Image (tube, rainbow, N blue to C red):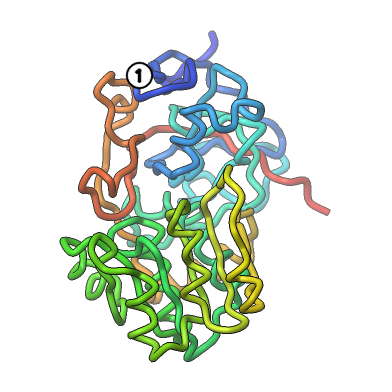
Amino acid sequence: MTDTMKAIVLAKFGGFDAFEMRDATVPVVGPRQVRVRVHATAINPLDYQIRRGDYADYVPLPAIIGHDVSGVVEEKGADVSEFDVGDEVYYTPKIFGGPGCVCGAARCRCRSGRPQAAQHQPSGGCHVWSLVGTVWEALVTRAQLAVHETILIHGGGAGGVGTVAIQLAKAMGARVITTARRSNHEFGAFGAAADEVIDHSSDDDVSAVAELTHGQGVNVVFDTIGGDTLTRSALALADAGRLVSIVDIAQPQNLIEAWGKNAAYHFVFTRQNRGKLDALTNLIERGLIKPVIGAVFPLARLGEKRNQPLEGGSSRGLRGKVAIDVVGQTVELPTPR
């Protein structure tokens, strides 16, 4: 008899009613696979971009989405030596080309899994890869933010990515300026340790940065918003500044201001890397980064017609990451060399 699981399936591209709760087959564990009982997954911008059809060519329907996993190994293949049954792990499956983890158990490829610290809550590690990994890629690998440099973080007042970016930048020894709605100023400045907060709903970002930096501009801009914010960000840069954006944009950018400042632009789509994950875990376990979970929704909420989580957490009053309670996942490990 074939085991089945409950899964939230993206049946069509569109709005919040695109999901259905269905029964799906639990895949058999292969020699280089482990099955993980998922405690939680998390919602990322990529998930609602997939839902609305931005990556239709890469995600054949019906599809199971979700690209952060936190859980416990419940079965392992004959050739697996890296993990044991009962190990707490967190990781991300392959972004495209395999199923996600908003389900009871699903097969996906995994290049690395990191054991959790015992004190982590069930939903505590599920956001590490896509959220903290993206920030690490942006600030450390691409921007190469240095001690005593100044960084402007757009949207750092309440969003999951922005709040982590503030904390990582501070841990790296940088001065942090962030933008946020006035209602989130205390959360952004004190909850996530920014040095200065600009009210983007009433203040002009560029003028405010010029005043705060005595006309010098910032060394790095980290963009989580895109659109006009990204276009105007070059005006806030110092000479030889770097701009890093995690927003995929369809419209061309006017880079004349960036050219005049010898600026470097980087567009980031994070990739899996065990060394990166180990470094991030070290920062989290030392308390230097504390990702904020704004809400936890049960799995069934993704199948409701009045679904809210995939509409974007912070835009609906949620501060931090949106986590989803789930059960079960199968992971394929790389073949040892």
Q: Residue at x 63, y 54 (%)?
A: 272
Q: Quadrant of residue 37?
A: top left
Q: Residue at x 69, y 31 (%)?
A: 30
In x, y percent, where is residue 16?
35, 24
In x, y percent, where is residue 94?
63, 41
Count the marks.
1
Residue closer to the observer: 309 or 52: 52
Quadrant in which the N terminus is drawn:
top right
Is residue 115 positioned above or below 262 on the image?
above
Q: Quadrant of residue 79?
A: top right
In x, y percent, where is residue 118?
37, 60
Residue 76 visible in image? no
Q: Amino acid at mark 1?
A: Asp
User: Which residue position holds label 1?
Assistant: 17
Q: Is residue 25 left or right of residue 186?
A: right
Judging from the image, what secondary structure is the residue with disc 1 in?
helix
